[in-house]
Amino acid sequence: MKSITINGSQRESVGKKATKALRNAGQVPCVLYGGDKPVHFSAPELAFSKLVYTPNAHTVVIAMENGTSYNAIMQDIQFHPVTDKILHIDFYQLFEDKEITMDIPVHIIGTSRGVLNGGVLRRNQRKLRVKALPANLPDFVEADITPLKIGSKLYITALANPDYKFLHPDNTVVCQVRRSRASVAEFEEEEEAAAAEAAEGAEGTAEGATAEATSEGQE
């Protein structure tokens, strides 16, 4: 998985007054959990843009001024209810031998037969919760919709991977192809045409049988 480096500064004080001063200076107060003790630090708000404002998943390298660095993932984030400015971020430290849980985006690949026939692709799950060792965390989960026909569903079991496991029930639908109005109209037209052909065929058969019976009677 791709990683983003955040250059952080150790926070000497964690009180409300100090936190407010940090925010006024364009800094975001953060806490790193998961180690022996929480690590309080801050970083410029712009440093988090590629981590927060993206649909992609990333791990984080928190590089402190004293030369210490930590591998982590973003666990929680708080925004201002009016301005949407970042108020606070919690991180969780990663260890090579410990599995971690993370939401991974779903990438759709392939071209669905059902969509080509007028169906509509519905994405039920844009992200999937995955549990794995840090080294096995994927950048994204691929979902191939090529075999999906109208009315078909792609279940999470079709995306199984030995490197990680999904924390969802086996009956979770990742995406499906639903019938659209256009496809319904096309289907009805096809049914009507087929019915008309069948009726014409039956009428032709009946006329042939009548003609044959008349011919036999004249003989």
Image (cartoon, grey):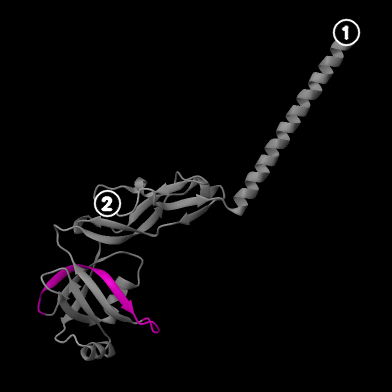
Q: Residue at x 28, y 48 (%)?
A: 161
Element at badge 2? strand
For label 1, the crowd category at 10 Å Cα-Cα, with few meaning under 14, some 14 to 19 and many 20 or more, is few
Residue 218 locus on image (x, y percent): 90, 11
Is residue 213 positioned above or below 90 on the image? above
Q: Do the residues labelled 1 and 2 touch (CB within 8 Å)?
A: no
Along the viewing direction, whichever of 7 and 30 lies nearer the viewer: 30
- Residue 67 falls within the magenta-colored stretch: yes
Q: Mark 2 points at which residue?
A: 165
* Number of dots carrying numbers: 2
Is residue 97 positioned above or below 150 on the image? below
For label 2, the crowd category at 10 Å Cα-Cα, with few meaning under 14, some 14 to 19 and many 20 or more, is some
Left or right: 23 in relation to 124: left
Q: In which quarter of the image is residue 197?
A: top right
Along the viewing direction, whichever of 1 and 96 lies nearer the viewer: 96
Residue 195 marker: none
Q: What stretch is highlighted in magenta?
A: 66-84
Element at badge 1? loop
- Going by the numbered disc 1, the residue's amino acid type is Glu
Q: Residue at x 28, y 56 (%)?
A: 130
- Residue 209 falls within the magenta-colored stretch: no
Q: Mark 1 points at which residue?
A: 219
